[in-house]
Amino acid sequence: MSDLLSIDFMQRALIAALLVGTVAPMVGIFLVQRRLSLIGDGMGHVALAGVAIGLVTGQGPVLTALVAAVIAAVVIELLRDRGRTNGDVALAVIFYGGIAAGVVIISKAPDGTPANLTKYLFGSILTTQREDLYVFAALAAVISFTTWALRPRLFAVANDEEYARAVGLPVLALNIVLAVLTAATVVIAMRVVGLLLISALMIVPNAAAQLIARSFSSGVRWAVAFGLVSAVGGVAVSYPLNTPSGGTIVLVAVAIFIVTAAVAAAIARVSQHRHAVAERHDHEHGLDCGHLAVPHGDHVDYVHDGHRHAPHEGHYDEHGDPQTAGSSGAETTGTRRG
Amino acid sequence: MTLAPAPTPAPTPAPATEAVLSLRAASFGYGDRPVLADVNLMVRPGEVVAVLGPNGAGKSTLMKGILGLNELVSGSVTLFGVPSTEFHDRARMGYVPQRHTLSASVRATVEEIVSSGRLPRLGRLGRMRATDRQIVARALDVVGLADRAATEVSTLSGGQQRRVLIARALASQPDVLIMDEPTAGVDAANQRVLAAVLERLADRDVTMVIVTHEIGALKRLFTRVVVVDAGRIQFDGTPQQYAARRTVARHDDGNGCDTHPVDQQDGRGTNRGTLALGPLDHLRGHHGWSA
């Protein structure tokens, strides 16, 4: 690893991976929440047209890709807001028009070789230049700050758009901001994992995180951790294995997902046995329900017909009988899903 | 009308005489096809209004129209004395939508969902302060979910999730609560808890407009009943007048529609001639038009 770090292009590759691995899941969780997991893919398609225009006109392809993706993002959100009819079809037209234009225009570029096309479609992190890195770092800083600052509002809109509208949150503006953040993420990730694999880095770490998270904020933390491990690990592994970095990163992310799913299932099975659910409980305990409330560790048990009932998820757990209170019971708290 | 003394500056409450909401000849819907036509309705502070009617009658359209979620085709809607087109202080409107599931796509805790109800009071970019957290905690207390603040919402029962939504609306310290079918699909134990929560709010003089197709579990709550059917308001009066009207009509209860007050003894009026009539048909008769 230490000799890996001493190689100049590997240093740049690892820094780029670090930036993308952190930022992509932060944006991706809102796409998962809005059930728009594949929209990043579509924006990647449009970004290719931007890249092609950049190559033909001699502009920096990163800049033109950013412009194309941001325009597509805004148009998509306006279409979604406007239309009840055929919004889905309109998206397909934009996405496929984008990738087709990209392929055609890139063939007219001075260095419009198939190899060049592959570089953008599947990523070529090892060719990342120092200047690219500055642009990526700036974009990553803007994206992570914006998602942090707007997180409660983006959460509220993605969670219940109708409610957000009713209470006067700026729903359309927030949706456009999210779309632009997605576009910017697509452009940073373009060099690292390639335009065809971008969605993977936004979505797969979140899919794994959702298996073990117990709250939205812990979901974000786990997803960023998984994204970082996948991106940096994928780049590090791809060098000695001599495999394409983009594909390797995504395979590492998928492997993390599978391992997490297996571990989560095993834990759920074990804790089910350590967990006694009060049977047929057609009463809801509360402040003035008339049952004696007994503090028990970090929660309150209610003494109900000689049983101690502790609220857990949608049901009540049995926490031993009142006589032996305090000595036992804490370990009966499980994590089984109700 | 706020639930508790507000530590944060809240808008000055409306004078007692000012209507919370007032609809004049209002029609809602899309384009030239109003779903609900010619609605005149005024709700005053402290009223608890039941909006009854069969499925598809236009109850939800009325509610969404009040909230500005669908188009006002003609007429006017005034909220707290301000025309709805110029009304921007939407945090005063507490909306409890009808949802059977909460946040199925990603994990979120009860507290996270309820905190999102505080956002309308935080301005463009404001973040939750200690007082906001207290208000959220108090909202959870009112609905009896204080001990489940950190629970993941999708693990809760339907009735508990409904109370999460009520707490979310309360978190913005609204001046009126507008609820869509709060008791639908909720088991008996949770319906009792829900009714107790709403009665607690009514005791604090919270104005409420509750859309429901079953008056049963909530019947002690209401000060007024509005019946919507076939795109119009068919009845508007006190619960006593509503009950009296039904008794006079003495129709058959055989079609299983649940807009009836549960306490009403039916089945003695075995008048075969009215057998095919729905529970609202006698009202149509009074208005002299048919379905």
Image: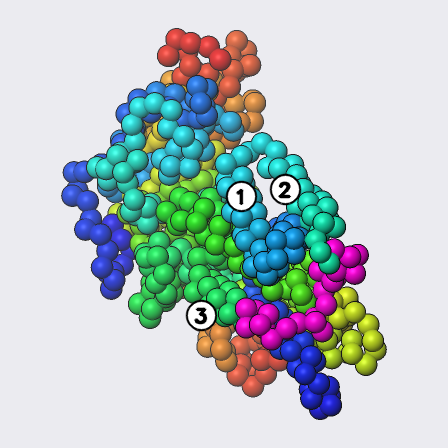
Name the subunit of mark 2.
Answer: A
Name the subunit of mark 1.
Answer: A
Query: What residue do we see at 32% from left, 49% from top?
Result: B91
| Type of the residue with mark 1 | Val
Q: Position of residue A216 (x, y in %)?
A: 54, 64
- Earlier along the polypeptide chain: callout 3 or callout 1? 1
Q: Is residue A129 magenta?
A: yes
- The circle on residue A334 is none
Mark 3: few/some/many CA within 10 Å (<14, 14-19, 20+): some
Alpha-carbon distance for marks 3 and 2?
A: 63 Å
- Earlier along the polypeptide chain: callout 3 or callout 2? 2
| Type of the residue with mark 3 | Leu
Check disc 1 and report the residue beneath it.
Answer: A75
Q: Where is B286 relative to A318, above or below?
A: above
Check disc 2 and report the residue beneath it.
Answer: A94
Q: Position of residue B162 (x, y in %)?
A: 48, 50
- Earlier along the polypeptide chain: callout 2 or callout 1? 1
Q: Is residue A88 magenta?
A: no
Q: Are marks 3 and 1 on the same chain?
A: yes
Alpha-carbon distance for marks 2 and 1?
A: 9 Å
Check disc 3 and report the residue beneath it.
Answer: A292
| Horizontal side of residue B171 vs A105, given as left or right | left
Tags 2 and 1 touching, CB below 8 Å:
yes
Mark 2: few/some/many CA within 10 Å (<14, 14-19, 20+): some
Q: Which residues are magenta?
A: A112-136
Q: Give the mark toward the camera: 3 or 2.
A: 2
Query: What residue do we see at 53% from left, 48% from top?
Result: A71
